[in-house]
Amino acid sequence: MDIREYTEYREDEIRCLYGAVGWTAYTENLHALEEGFRRALLVLAAWENHELLGIVRAVGDGATIVYVQDVLVRPDRQRQGIGTALLRAVLDRYADVRQIVLVTDSTAQTAAFYRSLGFAELSELGCSGFMRSMPKGC
């Protein structure tokens, strides 16, 4: 597996990846998704034999805050260390940034995954989070 910057946006492969993991709110507006990629601080992709396995997309200023917007891995390749490798690559790149944050589904599995990489729930840090979202949720 090779992890490198995703510099050439390819709508078909991104639509397929987001659709495969069920993130159809993104694929309903492909123009906005493409703009999100173009304006991102960093997008890394995991590749194997020229095949896209997953991506991580980060936004923010890269100096004081990084927000991990998306971590996606093809369903048939999940639980093989790809998501971990992608997220570690972001954490390594921004090791000196004070706040690296993300929002995710509230399940035991996702909590365990992010805890294994050093993340804590906001309430454990004496913080709370707020979000204004479109009616469809996260």
Image (cartoon, rainbow, N blue to C red):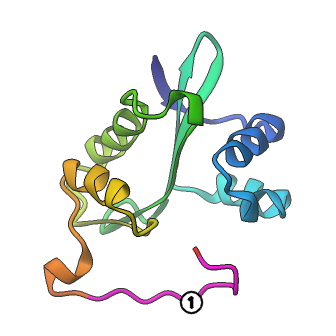
Nearest to the observer: residue 44 or residue 61 = 44
Asked which secondary structure carries label 1, the reply is: loop
Which is more toward the observer, 13 or 99?
A: 13
Q: Is residue 134 magenta?
A: yes
How many labels, in total? 1
Which quarter of the figure has residue 89?
top left
As drawn, 82 above or below 43: above
Report the residue at 69% width, 84% height from top: 134
Is 15 on the left-hand or right-hand side of 70? right
Disc 1 target residue: 132
Report which quarter residue 73 is drawn in.
top right
- Expressed as whole percent of the image width and height from the top left, the position of residue 50 reads 65, 14
Q: Residues within 10 Å of mark 1 (few under 14, many from 20)?
A: few
The extreme top residue here reads 49
Q: Is residue 137 above or below residue 71?
A: below
Q: Is residue 91 magenta?
A: no
Q: Nearer the viewer, residue 60 or 15?
A: 15
Residue 90 lies in quadrant:
top left
Residue 76 visible, this orientation: yes
Kind of residue sitting beneath label 1:
Arg
Image coordinates for residue 124, horizontal then vertical, percent: 15, 78
The image quadrant where one finds the C terminus is bottom right
Residue at the spot 57% in from the left edge and 29% down from the top edge: 76
Query: With 33 as the anchor, is 91 left or right in this view?
Result: left
Looking at the rendering, the stretch of residues picked out in magenta corresponds to 128-137
Camera sees residue 74: no
